[in-house]
Amino acid sequence: MLVLNEDQKLLMESARGAVAAKASVAAFRKLRADAAGEGFSRDFWRECAEMGWTGVLIPEAFGGLDFGVVGAGLIAREMARTLAPSPFLSTAVLAASALTRGGSAAQKSEWLARIARGEAIVSLAPPESATPSARAERIASGWRLDGARHFVLDGHVADAFLVAARAEGEEVLFLVAAEARGLKRDARTLVDSRRVASLTLAGVEVGSDAKLSGGAALIEEVVDIGRAVVSASLCGLAEEAFRRTASYLKERRQFERTIGSFQALQHRAARMHIDIENAWSASLKALEAIDARANSRPFDVAIAKSKASETACAATAECLQMHGGIGMTDEFDIGLYLKRARVESVLFGDAAFHADRVATMLGY
Amino acid sequence: MAIDRAEIRAWLEANCPPEMRTSGRGDEDLCWGGRRWVFQSEAQRLWFERCLTRGFTVPTWPKEYGGAGLSREDAATLTEEMRRLHARPPLVSFGISMLGPALLKFGTSEQKAMHLPRIARGEIRWCQGYSEPGAGSDLASLRTKAEDKGDHFLVNGQKIWTSYADKADWIFCLVRTDPAAIKQKGISFLLIDMATPGVSTKPIVLISGKSPFCETFFDNVAVLKANLVGTLNRGWDVAKYLLTHEREMIAGGGSNLFDMHALDKAAQRAAGGAKLNDPILRAEIARAAIDTYASEATRLRYLAEVAGGGELGARSALLKYDGTELNKRRHELAMSLAGAEALYFDGNGGPGQDVAQGWLRSKGNSIEGGTSEIMLDIVAKRLLELPSE
């Protein structure tokens, strides 16, 4: 436990090489500059499929690698280092685990296989605590869905959605094709230049076979998988921002000294390093707990998401400060890490949200 | 050959007396051994003697010195099984945690044969003579001198913060053997019997009202040269090894989680089945829990990474810093939880005084064994490789 095995190390190393070569920060900057574009590279997504990443959580029977959630976390962490935007989280992590765990045989053989081949983007629209849930009502041909969902990752390009809606008293997921009548999506651009969509469902009719099994427990488990993988991604952001900052501290000279020789900066850097180490340890523990189907999963995930969210936001801000004026410029990369960290810290519950859950789970 | 977990579990179940399956009041309720040791209970004696027969007072030491010869992994299994029972260690001492490992690495065969079995059997209690009034964080500026007098050294000077020196039988000391050499170069590592004429101790009363530390004085103390450990003037190497080992021991002890559970329980009691009614305090305790559980994951990850060989090295400074700072934070929160109840300090019962004692004691955590500031220096220079100028 808490040590990567040989396969996981290989995956991590090949992912590091692949994102550096094919999805660099410079590539992200080009995507960002194209306001009318999709916000990610279809070419890179195809390469992700060739490397098996789209199927990292999909069973071999449907063309996946079935590598486990630790593997998915390692890929997300490496993608974060170069800020590579892709539908990995929405499709390969959230949708793939929801369909694998709760999909019907027909849904699996169609959608899991397409996801594994990189031919479908599927977005999860989980319940939100802040807004009323969408509703699902029985009709003769199946279900009718009404309501709205916000902040749907890759919702602007999704081929299908997994929409959480309250059906007969329970939150369940429905698979809804993007072209379904009555479904409207509005793309929004986030502070980190990535895209999400707001969905409006007005009398969207789906067949009775659209409903996934597993109910609220499935949604909670899938969202926990997302939280753990985002935690790993937050660690990647913090680690890379810190790596760049440590190099800067060793190069930049003021007052005829390297600024990294100042004890005030050394101690701040050391504390930042410790927090980042702890965030990664907690994230790895959460990823392992999911793969092991451990009872401690909700607790381990809440610890990881809270710690990683707080650490990545604080560390990227501290890294910007240590760069001085140049850190404030758009031309310099450190601000991109700061913005991405803020977005991911909010996904599926921020540090405070999970701290509240931890307190409740610990009985106070 | 790996030890059999089931066998160990059964043996512990059968042999660890029920009274020894609680943490007690910490140091005060542990068995320290030594010439003047009197067992505090029959259970304590039984537990010690039973462990002794299996080498479990010093599980990783070679059998010839009274250990069980366990690998690091097997020792971890034993620790886990003991923790499962909440079993106390059968014997604690600075001989076990500090001097032993240094002797195993640097000692002569005579020194090992003489001292290690006595430590394992709890016959000799050791203390550590490092710090001096003028040499704290800057330990290498120490001035206690040992002059070469042919067959022996003549030691003069003063040590401070010597834990339990008033109860110890022997002391391992850093002394200056070459006053002309600069700092680290002229220091040697010396073993001194506290019964030697000229050695005296004086307890220091701390802010908690307790006196776990002493001043130790050396006034023309003659020490035979056979008591020099390692090479003359190279004692700093021994000291550094020992300090790293000490921090690893602190890191490996898992005391963080243990203390976190205590705070969790206190918060549960105060909450009484609902949410704590002070939302800010609740949030701060939760944040301390998150940081503690995350830090614990790092400790376990580092230990797992070195389980197959290798050493924690400078990472032990990271763990020492983080663990002790977290401990102080938790004790502050425990005081906040206890409120006015924790302020009664007249020994008239109530749980408050224990909370306050623990709080006051915790303030030393980030000073002893290397201050937090020195730990951060080590992390910055050795792990992050930040420049000196």
Image: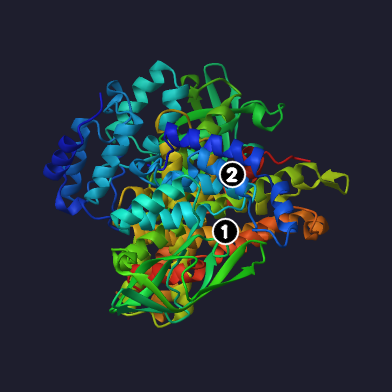
- Number of callouts: 2
At 41% from the left and 65% from the top, the residue drawn is: B357
Compare residues A184 and B12 and report the one nearer the observer: A184
On screen, B68 above or below B342? above
- Please tell me which residue is depicted at 57% across the width and 47% down the height of the picture: A45
Q: Position of residue A345 (x, y in %)?
A: 55, 63
Can you see residue A169? Answer: yes
Specify whether A315 is left or right of B79. Answer: right
The numbered mark 2 sits on a residue in which chain?
B
Residue at 79%, 41% (x, y): give it: B389
Up-down relation of residue A236 to residue A50 (above or below): below
Residue furthest out toward the right: A256
Q: Looking at the picture, which amino acid does disc 1 mark?
A: Thr
Give the residue at mark 1.
A311
Which of the image's four quarters has the C terminus of chain A? bottom left
**Disc 2 target residue:** B132
Distance CA(mark 2)–CA(mark 1): 39 Å
Q: Amino acid at mark 2?
A: Glu
To the question of a shared chain for discs 2 and 1, the answer is no
Residue under the point 67% across and 59% down: A338
Q: Which label belongs to residue A60?
A: none
Q: Position of residue B388 (x, y in %)?
A: 75, 40
Q: Nearer the viewer, mark 2 or mark 1?
A: 1
Which SS class for mark 1?
helix
